[in-house]
Image (cartoon, grey):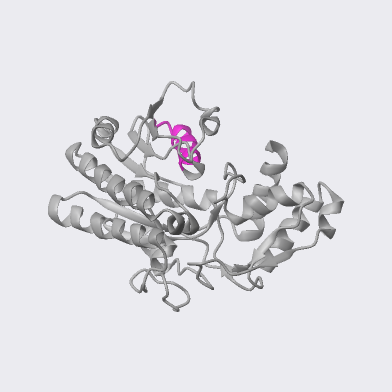
Amino acid sequence: MNYTNLTNKKILVTGGAGFIGSNLCEELLNRKAKVTCLDNFATGHKYNLDAIMAHEDFTLIEGDIRDLETCNKACKDQDYVLHEAALGSVPRSINDPITSNEVNINGFLNMLVAARDAEVKRFVYAASSSTYGDSENLPKVEHIIGKPLSPYAITKYVNELYADIFNDAYGLNTIGLRYFNVFGRKQDPNGAYAAVIPKFVIQLMKHESPVINGDGTYSRDFTYIDNVLHMNILALTTENREAVNQVYNTAVGDRTNLLELTEMLKTHLAKYDEKIADIEIKHGPNRAGDIPHSLASIEKAKEKLGYDPQFKIEAGIKEAVDWYWENL
């Protein structure tokens, strides 16, 4: 994969101790960039940074994006910003909309202001497929969205509106990446708001029955972490002027329902432990704020950024399961 050279480029990753952020930090260091991580460890973990903490080109700032002074300090002298910091999870936002709003909107605005004032070259941010809301269009195309179905979805849509304004009013170059159900190494399997794949993996490894919300026919465009790294690097380095100040689906362009996903996980885990193949799956009620189906069109990302996802669901699941088995 040919990218613009990132050697010695100064890049700030907010939320850099989180699942996606820590993978980005490692990828950027591998590309010889000088990386600064800003995180308050509300949902990220210091152990995600263990492999790079002593790296000579890595700097950690412990701080909160809700504090403008911290954002200004982190953005100072940076060439680029990859903004991953957010409070994820639809259920979390329904349970506590105020904190989700403070972090995802107020914190985002602080980062835009700090990036503008520091004159960074480009601000790439984590948007979300939740922005599509109740739109029934499949596949999801970037210019057609519906009514948001959760406080989280509202916050991520507002991020896109603010990014647009900061380009129009201040000339800040931005690119938003609407992530579709990202999974892979370092994704936290613990906690009330754990994502479905790591949560089910750890339950199956403990010989516990995973509980599917609903009948299992809800489907998602599950996206392996390496595809997301690929998209971030493309967004960071593209020299196509028409590609900047846009939002892009960051996905595979394929969907898998929860029944299929669970069987896939069982099959790959059973290679390590045969008993896992016989674990029963249970069903619970549908979850508030969940959309039935999610499938991305990735044509815009292919056309404008040259995106070509390297990992389909099956290959990604195999990689993720292998990582969890070795590291949990």
Asked whether, in this view, residue 166 is left or right of residue 191, the answer is: left
Residue segment shown in magenta: 21-34
Which one is nearer the viewer's eye here, 193 or 78? 193
Which residue: 36% across, 68% down? 142
The x and y percentages for residue 33 are 39, 32
Which residue: 35% across, 46% down? 103
Indicate whether 39 appears above or below 264: above
Residue 23 part of the magenta segment: yes
Total labels: the figure holds 0
Which residue: 33% across, 33% down? 9
Q: Residue furthest bottom?
A: 136
Asked whether, in this view, residue 85 is left or right of residue 69, the answer is: right
The x and y percentages for residue 68 are 24, 37
Q: Is residue 243 visible to the viewer in this orientation of the structure? A: no
Residue 29 part of the magenta segment: yes
Which residue: 44% across, 59% down? 94
Which one is nearer the viewer's eye here, 82 or 299? 82
The x and y percentages for residue 31 are 44, 35
Indicate whether 321 appears above or below 65: below
Asked whether, in this view, residue 119 is left or right of residue 122, the answer is: left
